[in-house]
Image (tube, rainbow, N blue to C red):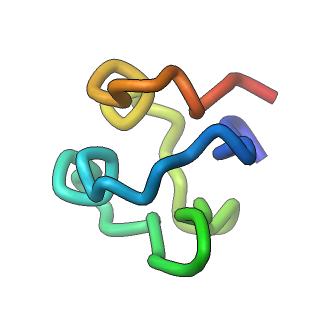
Amino acid sequence: MPRLITDSCIACGSCQAECPVECIKEGDIYVIDPDACIDCGACQEVCPVDAIIEK
């Protein structure tokens, strides 16, 4: 998996709205589907709490 959403996620939805392949799903925190992620980094750039890291 190219990127991972950590427990710092505040579930604001910024990453999900930015994802061009819609691989981020809602939950207690958001989760990236590793099979669908194209590793573009768009989600990481918009996260207000830096909860998305490269794995």
Total marks shown come to 0
Q: Residue at x 60, y 75 (%)?
A: 28
Name the quadrant of the C terminus: top right
Judging depth in this view, the residue of 48 and 21 nearest the camera is: 48
Judging depth in this view, the residue of 5 and 37 nearest the camera is: 5
Q: Position of residue 18 (x, y in %)?
A: 20, 46
Q: Residue at x 47, y 50 (%)?
A: 10
Q: Position of residue 32 (x, y in %)?
A: 59, 60
Q: Quadrant of residue 40?
A: top left
Q: Position of residue 37 (x, y in %)?
A: 53, 54
Q: Is residue 23 above or below residue 50?
A: below
Q: Position of residue 24 (x, y in %)?
A: 45, 65
Q: Residue at x 37, y 36 (%)?
A: 43
Q: Is residue 54 above or below residue 20?
A: above
Please give left or right for residue 50 compared with residue 31 in the image: left
Q: Residue at x 78, y 47 (%)?
A: 1
